Image (spheres, coloured by chain):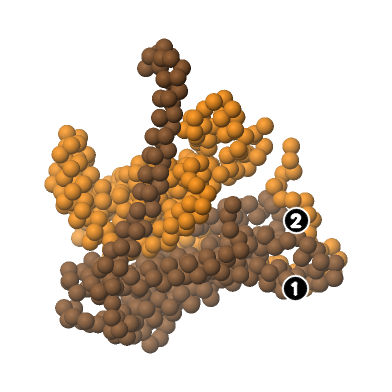
Chain colours: A orange, B brown
Amino acid sequence: MASPSGDPASRVATKAPPSSGARWPDISFRWLALLAALTTAALIVLVGWELYRGSRQAIAQFGLNFLGSSAWDPVTDKYGAWPFIYGTLVSSLIALVIAVPLGVAAALYLTEMAPLQLRQPIVTIIEMLAAVPSVIFGLWGIFVLIPWLRDHLFVWLKHTLGFLPLFQGPIYGVSMLAGGIIIAIMILPIITSVSREILRSVPDLQREAAYALGATHWEVIRIAVLSYARRGLFGAAVLGLGRALGETMAVTMVIGNRPVISASLFAPSYTLASVIANEFTEATTDMYLNALFELGLVLLVVTILVNIVAQLMLRTLSGGASGKVN
Amino acid sequence: MSETRHIQPAAAQHSWRRFKSGAMAGLLFVCALLVMAPLFLVLYFLIREGASALDWNFFTQLPKPTGEAGGGMANAIVGTLVMLAMAAVIGVPLGVMGGIYLAEYGSDRANDWIRFTADVLNGIPSIVWGMVVYVLLVVPFKTFSAYAGGVALGLMMVPLVMRTTEEVLILVPQGYREAGLALGIARWKIITVIVVKTALKGIVTGVLVAMARVAGETAPLLFTALGNNFWSHRLSEPISALPLQIFTYAISPYDDWHRQAWAGALVLMAVILILNVSVRILSRGRKFK
């Protein structure tokens, strides 16, 4: 039964507006600060409104069919979003399948196992990875990753797992799988660092209780840490998904940019963000531009929803964690 | 499976559990290595491919026409700096003032909402910023421009700066504010002269990290700054930027341009790493654990 806020009482006290002598510089400063703080909400509304305005014609013309249609033909002015939605979802899914286990495992190593003097250097390295620009991953993807995938990993996958439809068909290098792998690399840092925060919030009491029952190190992690942090780790994965969906440059450079839907992960694909990046400045007709705006609107709505879910999961966890133990 | 384990003698079962624990520890270690590996792979190839293509001309010359060897990215380097400066002009005041509001004013409930929107805003894909600024600044003025690119980057900085500013302001001891109040100093003066000044190092750190982050952005510049093979003489003209130039060269079919793309990427990465490392040195006082 703590106070509704987590703040120390002293902070709350000085946060109250000064009761006497609230002169105009004070009031106007406060209002300026409030305005600046509210720009965040205003910007979200502005972004949504502008994308909606930009896509009104397409929405009126195609309605809900836009989402399910596979047409993308500037000549006849027929547009549909399905291949791009499919490409975005599948590439992000591949990225999550790779990045979530790796990221959570790395976070576990960092919080539960690594020698203390190693922790800060590893955290720094992962933060540096997060600082690498998308376009540099794309460049590296084109000239280093793709040739290696094409000549080694993909060939091997085709040999060993070729009976699955996922790993059949011709190998070009640029492909859905390459896109998924590059996204995975790019969301690894955020998944790792958020997971680490979650794991660090697991009370030591949990671990000590498990040790007291005679559990081994791994059993402590599995029983006491992972089960306690499960919800938060799920939130970290959803946050990673939000980033994955919107990744643009690196994906555009390695995914092949062809709006085809194929069972094979070796086939090229196209994502919402990539098609906007590639075709926006070439859009010649109004309807073409409108269709691209509608793709942007779809991308925006999905990423905002995913981000809201992620924030809610991470928030309720950190809010409830302190009261739930004991 | 579990039944067979139950009839094993306790000692054997224990050693199996110990073995499993050790194996999992090894596996976690390998995963941590795998997470770090891409950074070293990228840096290795950046240096291997980029260093040989890097010369004085790269920093002083304009791009050569298609097919001609040589040339540099002088205009792109200047373009990136110009747009970063404009981004800071927009992002820093809004972000810092917003951070001040979160740390110093507002009810907890309202601030929770503002933080929430800032985090959601931070998750909006960068390509979307490009589209929105295109509608707001490129269409009305009928030209791609440095202004549009700077605004796109600046708006992306707002939530980043806001959150870091709030974090460092909260670290300023309450006693400082109380001392100011006891002396009868106006609140806005307490905040600007005492609180912000105390936390200035942290705020600068946050700003630099945000700038390092947007310095590498390409997607929001595609339809705003557009890129330019020549010097931009006015801010109302299309302008080049390092990430844009790297992108254009990387997807081109020319070997010489590929070399230049690697050189550009090496320079961009060096700038970003130097910004990040200097920030770490600057804020060395606040270490974790």
**Residue B252 percent location from the top left of the image:** 21, 69
Q: Chain for mark 1?
A: B
Residue at image x 16%, y 78%? Answer: B67
Toward which corner of the image does residue A312 lie, by quadrant? Answer: top right
Q: Is residue A163 visible?
A: yes
Question: Quick one: label 1, few (<14), some, or many (20+) residues within 10 Å?
Answer: some
Pointer 1 residue = B189
Nearest to the observer: residue B106 or residue A316: A316
Q: Chain for mark 2?
A: A
Image position of A200 with respect to B71: above or below:
above
Residue at image x 38%, y 63%? Answer: A133
Label annotation for residue A11:
2
Q: CA distance from mark 1 to mark 2?
A: 18 Å
**Residue A52 percent location from the top left of the image:** 43, 58
Q: The residue under label 2 is which amino acid type? A: Arg
Residue contact between numbered discs 1 and 2, judged by CB atoms under 8 Å: no
- Mark 1 vs mark 2: same chain? no
Nearest to the observer: residue A70 or residue B257: B257
Residue at image x 33%, y 82%? Answer: B59
- Figure quadrant of the C terminus of chain A: top right
Nearest to the observer: residue A61 or residue A326: A326
Image position of B193 with respect to B112: above or below:
below
